[in-house]
Image (cartoon, rainbow, N blue to C red):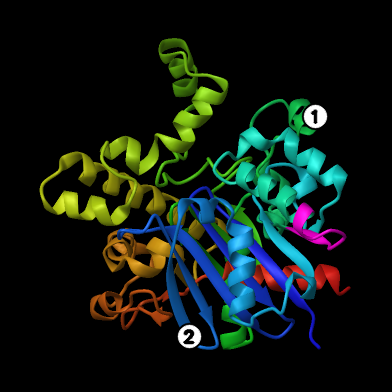
Amino acid sequence: MDKKYLIVNRGSASEKYAVYTKDKCLGFLHLEKSETECDYVSTLYFEERKVQNCVSKKEFQDSLNYTLNLFKTSNIIADKNEIAGIGIRIVAPGKPFQNHKVIDLAYEKEIKKVLKEAPLHLLPTYEMILTLRKAFKNIPIVGVSDSDIHSSIPDYAKYYGIAKIDSDKFGLQKYGFHGISVGSILHKLQSENAQLPSRLIVCHIGSGVSVTAIKDGKSIENSMGFTPLEGVMMATRAGDVDPGVLAFLEDNLALKGKKLREYLNKKSGLLGVSGKSSDVRDLIKLEQDGDTQSKLALDMYAYRLQKYIGSYFTILGGLDTIVFTATVGERSFIMRERICQGLEILGIKIDQEKNNRSEGIDADISASGSKVKVLVRKTDEMGQMARDTISILEK
């Protein structure tokens, strides 16, 4: 019988679980806030079926137990004793987290040291690790690094312009994130064409946003840095900010430490600029109704993506393919068009009709004569995590 692996991807507002064998996904579950009368909703995909159920707040808070029971009643597992290993996504700054590895007590100790640096991801993940430890005694848990693929970023790109002695002492450097998503895109492109394009940009555009430059199959730049806060403006994250502004906020608004991190991670970005919403769909509607702050937020969002794409075009020495992925990248034809406008000078041209038809599907939206292939590809972080977990546990 094939070994079964539990894959866990925990966020601040959603939970994803899946069971994989070496060859396939047996079941995938997504729990998230509901837009209907339910508190939360669970969507289970298995045996080419899709089953949705209302989930109470209590069930969501105890999501592991809810998931295991659902996997059992759906015959995805007979019981939890069938699980041979577990993989969980780790979004954390620091060299201990730059590679995939089995989580031990020393690893957990390192996580505790940096909990405050990635608050949207790391605290929920750490709590889940402790829960998994209790539920699955003696079963190995692999920390699947969201930065692993970016370990190839060269030194001149990964260090900050601060005293090198401090960089080395505290591990202050660019680690980059969304590496699991980028890895899944590379896997998909290789399965389609056998060979990756030599010069590739991957735009992961969701609640978190990042741009990655891939040269000959290796990451050479990622817009995120020491933490997932650097880079493009995001749903609630500020992205790039002049350090002088941070000092000013500390002096004038008494924002420092935990309060400053919360401000930059949860009260900035699209939400902070618009003053209305962090959701691109809401902001597009508000903009269409004449809301100027929502328009400004979306203009800034697109502009910063364009800046990163342009700069990565330069460091790659040109561009063969650009990929849009993640929730907004896959589903919002409006934002894809907005981002690509003005990039014709780089050889990026999209076919408007193809783009408008491509919502949540894999597609080639390149215009005839475009020098750069423009693709929409669905990310598969869970599948990539399963491959990475199995490669560690079945060495």
In the displayed structure image, the side of residue 294 where residue 22 appears, left or right:
right
Q: CA distance from mark 2 to mark 1?
A: 51 Å
Q: Say whether residue 109 is left or right of residue 290.
A: right
Question: In the picture provided, is 219 more to the left or to the right than 132?
Answer: left
Residue 103 position in % (x across, y down): 82, 53
Residue 372: image location, x then y, percent: 42, 74
**Residue toward you, 236 or 166:** 236
Front residue (pair 372, 379): 379
Image quadrant assignment for residue 273: top left
Q: Residue furthest top?
A: 251
Residue in front for this viewpoint, 175 or 41: 41
Residue under label 1 = 169
- Relative to 364, 159 lies left or right: right
Q: Which residues are magenta?
A: 134-143
Residue name at image x 60 percent, y 52 percent:
177
Q: Quadrant of residue 237?
A: top left
Q: Earlier in the sequence, mark 2 or mark 1?
A: 2
Q: What amino acid is at disc 2?
A: Arg
Question: In front: 334, or 221?
Answer: 334
Question: Which amino acid lies under the numbered mark 1 shown in the image of this protein?
Answer: Lys
* Disc 2, SS: strand
